[in-house]
Image (cartoon, rainbow, N blue to C red):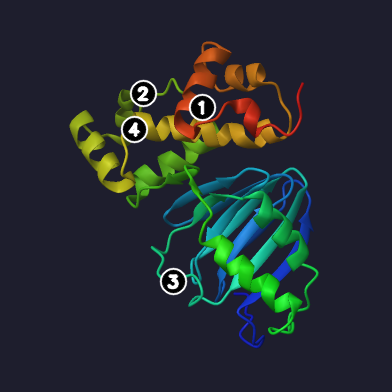
Amino acid sequence: MSSFREVPRPVIALGTDYPDGHVIAAHRHDRDQLLYGMTGVLMASTPQGAWMMPPQRGMLIPAGVIHEVRLFGDVKMRSLYLRPDRLGATDNQCKVVGISSLMRHLLIEAVAVPPEYDMAGRDGALMALIEHEIKRLPVLPLSLPLPEQAGLREKCRVFLASPTPHETIDDWCDHLGMSRRSFTRQFRKETGSSFVEWRQQACILAALPRLANGEAVTTIAMDLGYDNPAAFSNMFKRILGASPRDYRTTDT
C-alpha cells in the first residue's frame, strides 16, 4: 500500500515509465489516484471487474480499492494522488475518463512540481486548477464487471483471455451445468448486463491494446472471430461512440 500521508499537500504528481508486459501486483493507495497514459494501454483489475485505459485517456481509482495493473506496450504514465476529501463522494468504483487538452498539459506540468510545493504560489495554483478539472472529466464506457459467484467468475476470466463473439449462452450453460433460465438470471444479477452485452464489451476491450499498437482493424476483427471488419467496426462504434481507427496510435 503506497502512502503519502507524510506529505502535507492535497495533490501529488509522479511520472513513471513501464515496459511492455509489466505487471503491478495487487495493491491499494490511501489517496484517490488519477492515472494518465501518454502511450500504451493499461488494464486495471479489482474484485469487482476490469477497466481498460487506452492511450491519452485516464483512470480514476478510489482510495482503498485493491487493484492489479497490467501494461500493454511501452507505457509513459503520469499519476496524481489526491486526498480522498478533495473529490467528494464516490461510488468506490474505478472509472476510465476522457482527458481534455487542458488536463493533458496540466498533468505534464504537474510531474515537475516538488511534493512539498508552495500552495500560495504558481505550483499551488496549478494543483488547484487540476482539482477543478478532474471533476469535469467525462466517464468512458470501458469497464467490464465480473460476477462474484466463483464458477461463473472463473469462466469469465477464461473467456477474457481469448474472447470471441461466437460463444453462446448454451455453451456457457453446458460448461457450468446450469439451465439457460438460471444462467441468464444469475448473469444479469451479478454483472448488470446480459450475456450478449457483456460478451461484446469483452471483445471491444480485448481489441484496444492491439489498436493502440497500430494493428490493422481487419486483422483484429478476423482474430476475434468476426465475419468481416464492418461487423466489428459497427459494434465498436455502437458501444464506444467512435470508430476503431480513433483508438489507433498509427495508421497502417
Q: Secondary structure at mark 2?
A: loop
Q: Which residue is mark 1?
A: 236
Q: Calculate the distance from the C-alpha at mark 1 to the C-alpha at mark 3.
A: 33 Å
Q: What's the amino acid at mark 1? A: Phe
Label 1 element class: helix
Question: What type is the residue that disc 4 sits on?
Answer: Phe
Q: Is residue 252 above or below residue 90?
A: above
Where does residue 28 sit, x and y in percent of width and height? 55, 69
Q: Nearer the viewer, residue 85 or 28?
A: 85
Q: CA distance from mark 2 to mark 4?
A: 9 Å
| Mark 4 or mark 3, earlier in chain | 3
Q: Secondary structure at mark 3?
A: loop
Residue type pointed to by label 3: Gly
Q: Is residue 37 visible?
A: yes
What residue did someone put label 4 on? 195
Q: Inspect the image, locate mark 2, and give the three-letter code of the amino acid beneath it.
A: Thr
Q: Could you tell which of marks 2 and 1 lies nearer the N-terminus?
A: 2
Element type where label 4 sits in the image? helix
- Quadrant containing the N terminus is bottom right
Measured as percent of width and height from the top left, residue 16 is found at 77, 61
- Going from N to C along the chain, the mark reached first, 2 or 4, is 2
Determine the residue located farthest toward the left in the rendered image: 181
**Of circles 2 and 1, which is in front?**
1
Q: Which residue is mark 2?
A: 168
